[in-house]
Image: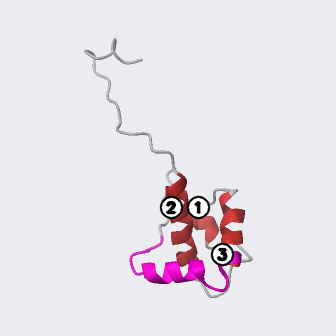
Amino acid sequence: MLFKLEKPDLSKIDHKQIFELLIGNNKTEIFDFIKRTSSKYLYWDKIRYEKPSPKEISKKELWMIIKIFRESQAIKTGEPVFVTDESKGLVY
C-alpha cells in the first residue's frame, strides 16, 4: 500500500515576510516551536496540527522556516558515486 504525503504550496509565501517574522516580536515563540518540533523531526502532515503554535504566523510560514533550518543543518555529502564493473576494484 502506497501513501502520498501532501506537500504544502510554499510558492506564494513572501520571503521578506519570513525574515520579518524571524526578527519580530514573537521570534522567541517561533524558535521555541521550531526547537520542539525539530527534536521530533515532524513532517508537514504533523506540523500543521501541532499545538500550541506561535501567534501571527501561518503553519505554512512555520513549515518554510523549519525547512530552511533543516536545509542549513544538512550534511553535504558531495556528488553521488556510481560503481561500474570496471571500477569495482577502485572503490573502497
The alpha-carbon separation of the residues under discs 1 and 2 comes to: 9 Å
Disc 3 marks a residue whose amino acid type is Ile
User: Image height check: is 81 above or below 76?
Assistant: above
User: Image height check: is 88 above or below 53?
Assistant: above
* Residue that mark 2 sits on: 5
User: Horizontal placement of 41 versus 82: left or right?
Assistant: right
Seen at 51% across and 57% down, the residue is 72
Crowding at mark 3 (Cα within 10 Å: few <14, some 14-19, many 20+): many
Find out whether the residues at labels 3 and 2 contact each other: C-beta distance under 8 Å: no
Seen at 57% across and 82% down, the residue is 21
User: Horizontal placement of 21 versus 83: left or right?
Assistant: right
Q: Nearer the viewer, residue 43 or 69?
A: 69
What secondary structure is found at the residue carrying circle 3? helix
Measuring from the top left, give residue 61's x and y in whole percent: 53, 77
* Nearest to N terminus: mark 3 or mark 1: 3
Residue 37 in the magenta stretch? The answer is: no
Disc 2 marks a residue whose amino acid type is Leu
Q: Nearer the viewer, residue 71 or 63?
A: 71
Quarter location, residue 40: bottom right
Find out whether the residues at labels 1 and 2 contact each other: C-beta distance under 8 Å: yes
Question: How many numbered dots are placed on residues in this image?
Answer: 3
User: Image height check: is 5 above or below 51?
Assistant: above
Disc 1 marks a residue whose amino acid type is Tyr
The reply to whether residue 13 is visible in this rendering is no
* Residue that mark 3 sits on: 30
